[in-house]
Amino acid sequence: MGRKDDVPMHRIPPSKRMEQAFFQSVFEGSGFLSGMVQAGAQLMLQRALEEEVTVFLERGHYKRGKRLQSGYRNGYEPAAISSGEGKIQVELPQTRETEFSFRSVILELWQRRSENLEKLIPALYVKGLSQRDIERALKENLGVDKVSRSVVSKSSKKIYSDFDQWRKRDLSGYKILYLFLDSHYLALRQGTDKKEGVLVAWGVTEEGKKVLLHIDRGERESYDCWKTFAEDMKLRGLNGPLLVIVDGNSGLKKMLWECFSYSLIQRCQVHKMRNILSKLPKDIHTKMKRLIHSAFYARDYSEGLRIARDIIARFEDEFPSAMECLAESLEDVLCVLKFPATHRKSIRSTNLLERLLGESKRRTKVSPRFPTEKSCLSLVYAVLIDVSAHWHGLKMTPKIEEDLAVLRASCRKQKIPTPELVQPKDLELVKV
């Protein structure tokens, strides 16, 4: 028979049992250092939880006596808390017959900290920090020794989930005025240096707001890839934009006639200038650039067309390749001059998208190879969403809106698909 003051085993606080197990593992040398660290953290946290309920009830474990708070301990419920060393199993004290229900402030703060870390880690990753950089930052600022694989996995799954929802979302709510299309190349696969194309679309709405629309895998010059890319957006409700801004590759041009046949096309002037200068001697670059800019930045479309044709006539014998390049799709290159002057700077090239893609490329260098295509696209999405959050919109006024409405109406009347692309629904628009 035990002594009168013996306490039954089930009444021993969990912290006492954890303490015994911890010191036994230390004395016997039965655990790795990381296991001992986790056991020590478990012990300290359990003690804190038990002290917290003692303060709440204003009396010790299985002690009787006068107190201000009514109620009793009512056993424990198992709980798991995330930490840098993985999950820590604790026993959460329960109470009964209390005026107010017991809620552990310690547990809430710990869980909130864990949740904040889970939000912070993907945010830092998206900013271009490697896992090693993130671990160093967390250790220096928050005392977190390492980021567990489970936290990294959760972060990745969160980005994947967000991307899946984003790429399937309804686009019918966006009334797109200007649509920008571009692509860049990334080394997507582990085990190979081959780079693959990522297609990107963003737009400006009729309210002047800039919005990222779509990201997908695809080859830059492939008509089939661009058509699938565009049809995906249209199936999700994308309206026909007034203007599509592109760099002018062959796959894009054919797709535009099929998918956006009543939209105006703006060929990127930066790409065009780059191509022209590549066909000229370097000592004439400055002079020719100034001349061509006088056409690109003319007062209106007709003046720009006249200046460009004068340049072509003047230099076509001396620099035939360069002038042929300038003449190719000249109407599309100067299309921006039909639009409000305050918008021209933003729509004459795909520069913003190129800068965006360049930033994406820089940040994704922390993962030079992705285990899956989805992991690559998900990170590109997260980076682009992060960068695009700082975009400024375009100014819209009643006069600008009126001018754009007139231009759109004019396009509907005049823009006719090429004969080989005419569909039955379009026949009524074709005047014989």
Image (cartoon, rainbow, N blue to C red):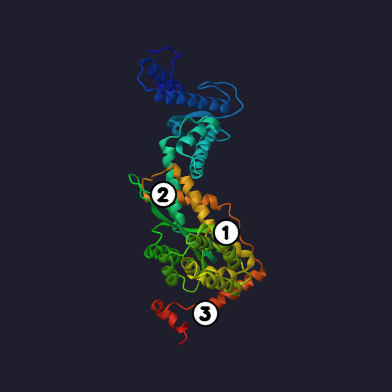
* Label 1: how many Cα within 10 Å (few below 14, some 14–19, many 20+): few
Foreground mark, 2 or 1?
A: 1
Label 1, on which residue? Answer: 286
Q: Which mark sits nearer the N-terminus, 3 or 1?
A: 1
The Cα–Cα distance between marks 3 and 2, rounded to whole angstroms, is 42 Å
Quickly name the residue at label 3. 414
The answer to whether 3 is drawn above or below residue 168 in the figure is above
Name the residue furthest bottom: 432
Which amino acid lies under the numbered mark 1 shown in the image of this protein? Thr
The percent position of residue 148, horizontal first and vertical second, equals: 43, 34
Residue at point 40%, 48% (across, down): 375
Query: Which residue is nearer to you in this view: 204 or 294?
Result: 294
Q: Secondary structure at mark 1?
A: helix
Instruction: Tell me, for residue 376, which label it has, or none.
Output: 2
Mark 3 Cα shell of 10 Å, populated few (<14), some (14-19), many (≥20): few
Of pointers 3 and 2, the one earlier in the residue sequence? 2
Q: Residue at x 58, y 25 (%)?
A: 58
**On-image quarter of the N terminus:** top left
- Amino acid identity at mark 3: Gln
Q: Nearer the viewer, residue 73 or 275?
A: 275
